[in-house]
Amino acid sequence: MTQHQRLLIIDFGSQVTQLIARRLRELNVYCEIHPYQNVTDAFLADFAPQAIIFSGGPDSVTREGSPRPPQSAYTMGVPILGICYGQQVMMQDLGGLVEAGQSHTAEFGRAYVTPAAQKLSILEGWFEGEGKDAGREQVWMSHGDHVSRLAPGFEVYGTSPGAPFAITADLARNFYAVQFHPEVHHTPNGAKLYENFIRLAGFTGDWTMAGYRQQAIEQIRAQVGKSHVICGLSGGVDSSVTAILLHEAIGDQLTCVFVDHGLLRLGEAEQVVAMFRDNYNIKLIAADESDLFLGALEGVSDPEVKRKTIGKLFIDVFQKYANEIEDAEFLAQGTLYPDVIESVSFSGGPSVTIKSHHNVGGLPEKMGLKLVEPLRELFKDEVRALGRELGLPESFIGRHPFPGPGLAIRCPGEITREKLEILRKADAVYIDQIRKHGLYDEIWQAFVAILPVKTVGVMGDGRTYDYACALRAVTSVDGMTADYYPFSHEFLGETATRIINEVKGINRVTYDITSKPPGTIEWE
Ligand code: XMP
């Protein structure tokens, strides 16, 4: 159990509920998102939030049986902020009126709110713009229904053309309700509204990484006791932070397993071993299983067969090494908060979304191991902050994501050792170029794919017949959508020249300018 001040977000199914949590975490406030179905009176009493936020949601409060918070939310004496559907729920529950959507009151997208005569503390710092924005504030609306009569005790503090009750509050009870979404980027001053709300709710901003580190260490010790823990290392930031945190908590009771499947980048296996075994003195089994994996992949060119082959072998190999560790009772995983948030499901009960590649293919059940997941309360950027707190070098923390199947999915067609070797060298030159030009941190992911075609070229006085490759670089926030990175022509030209000059086996370089969708980031 965390000892921090806690805020509860009751999720009514909005697409952007996670962004509310992000905004609050940025303000050093600890919060959890729970789907409305799970938030009972008993849950609320046990959770003991210092404030509550009702999220938006797709349903209509005018529909019988639509989602509601428990009534005790209104009587426990804590501030509440209702957003969009959350505002409408509040009005309906407390005696106001909500009407189903009509075309002239529905608002989707950008809108401008103007203030009422009275000032409101959660709007401090609002309406201070100049020029065309004088006296108004841009907000993001997304509602069909609208409040047509306020609940007793509420007053209006801001209006927009389609929402006469855009900002409302009952100051006696500290209830605030807005029709728009302050958590999204398109409400530029939204973060300020959250900041004001949590300040008036008495939050001191006690959710810091130094505090989290201490607390996580105590929790790990309490959970694990004298048992041994196995941690799979991939070289990525999540598993690295997990391992270092565990090591700080339980020292030699931790053994890490790093499987080199022969599909890693240039020097990557050596770097991981040097970092963990040599620098941190962590017990590490570094298994070079490249012959096994590359052998099994011989002649395979179908992308799905490649992935399945690698996935299955990985589990077998990991299990083989894990079995060598005596008294192992726990498996550590770098599961993050977005992977464990229970999402609201309208087709049935709440459903838990866990990405399959995080749960090493059901290994814990298969081996009878219990899970330790010390990052499951954190977002990705918080994991990075924790990594910094733990002293991980910046070069590890800021690394681009790298897929589990590794270079296999950057080598369309059949995988050969020769092609992998060429790919590694070309990739290293490309990344070196990106770093030298100071672009690495602006790019979400960059890599080379070696193409299954050879092309004719001319070098010196001779004809060449070598592989073509494609450079890929994308910007993204979560990997779900992506855009190609707009390198300058100079950069591309210089990089192509360097690759062709420095990497034997490549005589043609192309740049992939496909966005996602319709493309994917990886080539397979
Ligand atoms: P795509 O290619 O689907 O990739 O646009 C989106 C993000 O996911 C990574 N990726 C994977 N990561 N196992 C992983 O751990 C996989 O099988 C896998 N496939 C894709 C990819 O690198 C990108 O960051």
Image: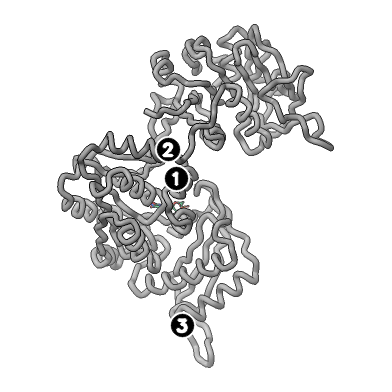
C-alpha gap between disc 2 and disc 3 = 56 Å
Ligand 1 is within 8 Å of the C-beta of the residue at disc 1: no
- The image quadrant that residue 157 belongs to is top right
Q: Amino acid at mark 2?
A: Tyr
Report the disc number at residue 386.
Answer: 1
Q: Which residue in the rendered view is the most extreme toward the bottom?
A: 461
Considering only order in the chain, which callout, 1 or 3, is on the residue closer to the N terminus? 1
Circles 2, 1 touching at the beta carbon (< 8 Å):
yes
Query: Where 349 falls versus 410 (above or below)?
Result: above
SS class of the residue under badge 1? helix
In the picture, the quarter occupied by the C terminus is: bottom left
Report the disc number at residue 117.
Answer: none
Q: Nearer the viewer, residue 477 or 204?
A: 204
SS class of the residue under badge 3? strand
Considering only order in the chain, which callout, 3 or 2, is on the residue closer to the N terminus? 2
Q: Position of residue 267 (x, y in %)?
A: 38, 68
Q: Amino acid at mark 1?
A: Leu
Q: Which residue is mark 3?
A: 465
